[in-house]
Image (spheres, helix red, strand yellow):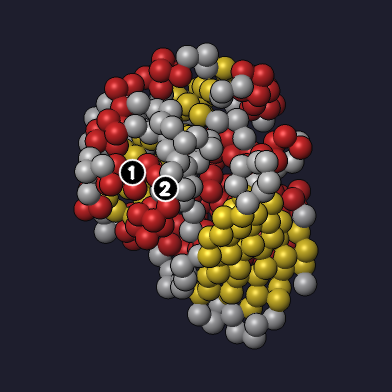
């Protein structure tokens, strides 16, 4: 059985291939049971979460991710997300690979957002605002740059020092990044706004969004969390990775529905419909689009299969 560490996992998941692999998985007959989601008390700290996410393509591959999310790990200089993915043969049950779960999660999440932007962001999008400075931030900027001609990256975070460090890291990998001191101004300039935070209160306000912008919401993974306000949701055409996940866990969708701002019927499409072409995605240059992602097990399975194939020499570069 192959065992891939963080660096090996990163190297085995180049974004152009990963985006296509995830698109194909959304078009497949992948079976994806409801994931186990368990809150865990951590004395004196924020509540942690354990996720168990199984998925399989009949006769092809089986996989399960065990993921622990500890919001206060930054206090210990540890990553928020720690986990492992176990990939097995769908024909024999043989265990094929153990893939580092944190890097897999970060890269497949970013790749899924970039895939959504393929259908929802304007083709001429050139400025991206990254809200949040965690592990996902660099991945999201790099992934979005694969599908759109992004020339300028604005980075905002609650902690100015962390935001400036993220700017330096982005510049190191060749992105033209600058620190965004004022969130409202940056949001009004951006063609793509990507949020990956642990915020419980709205950060992005609908009044800031310019016509034609695309809002990519990733961080609010509980119904009690939120990154956009009611006006942002009301002004936008709404899309999700999966209806089942977003309607249960995505606070940016759940809360406006509970408040009567929108209904579940206002969700225009989920990712599988976009990938199959049954919904066209963006329909005009002036349309404001919103994509809410809470994560789907098939994305992990797609990434794990690609990583295994690269690491075992089945894919050459």
Q: Residue furthest front?
A: 43
- Residue labelled with disc 2: 223
Which quadrant does the N terminus fall into?
bottom right
Q: Is residue 269 visible?
A: yes
Image position, residue 197 (x, y; %): 53, 36
277 relative to 189 in the view: left or right = left
Image position, residue 160 (x, y; %): 61, 18
Q: Which mark is residue 234?
A: none
Disc on the earlier residue, 1 or 2: 2
Residue drawn at point x = 28 percent, y = 47 percent: 258
Answer whether labels 1 and 2 touch (C-beta < 8 Å): yes
Indicate the secondary structure of the residue bearing disc 2.
loop
- Residue labelled with disc 1: 255
Which quadrant does the C terminus fall into?
bottom right
Q: Residue furthest bottom?
A: 92
Indicate the secondary structure of the residue bearing disc 1.
helix
In depth, the one of 64 and 288 nearer the eye is 64
Residue drawn at point x = 53 percent, y = 65 percent: 36
């Amino acid at each position: 059985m192959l065992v891939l560490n963080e660096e090996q996992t990163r190297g085995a998941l180049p974004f152009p291939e990963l985006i296509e692999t995830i698109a194909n998985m959304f078009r497949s007959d992948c079976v994806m049971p409801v994931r186990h989601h368990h809150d865990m008390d951590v004395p004196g700290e924020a509540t942690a979460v354990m996720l168990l996410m199984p998925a399989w393509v009949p006769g092809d591959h089986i996989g399960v991710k065990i993921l622990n999310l500890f919001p206060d790990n930054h206090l210990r200089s540890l990553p928020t997300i720690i986990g492992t993915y176990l990939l097995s043969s769908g024909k024999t049950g043989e265990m094929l690979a153990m893939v580092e779960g944190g890097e897999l999660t970060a890269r497949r999440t970013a790749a899924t957002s970039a895939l959504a932007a393929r259908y929802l962001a304007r083709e001429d999008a050139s400025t991206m605002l990254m809200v949040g400075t965690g592990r996902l931030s660099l991945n999201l900027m790099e992934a979005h740059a694969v599908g759109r001609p992004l020339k300028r990256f604005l980075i905002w975070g609650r902690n100015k020092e962390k935001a400036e460090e993220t700017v330096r890291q982005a510049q190191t990998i060749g992105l033209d990044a600058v620190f965004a001191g004022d969130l409202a101004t940056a949001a009004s300039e951006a063609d793509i706004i990507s949020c990956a935070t642990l915020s419980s209160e709205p950060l992005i306000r609908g009044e800031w969004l310019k016509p034609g912008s695309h809002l990519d919401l990733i961080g609010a993974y509980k119904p009690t969390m939120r990154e956009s306000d009611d006006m942002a949701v009301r002004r936008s055409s709404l899309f999700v990775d999966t209806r089942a996940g977003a309607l249960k866990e995505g606070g940016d969708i759940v809360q406006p529905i509970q408040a009567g701002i929108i209904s579940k019927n206002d969700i225009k499409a989920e990712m599988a419909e976009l990938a199959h072409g049954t919904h066209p995605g963006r329909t005009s240059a002036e349309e404001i689009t919103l994509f809410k992602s809470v994560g789907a097990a098939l994305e992990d399975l797609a990434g794990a299969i690609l990583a295994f194939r690269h690491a075992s020499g089945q894919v050459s570069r």
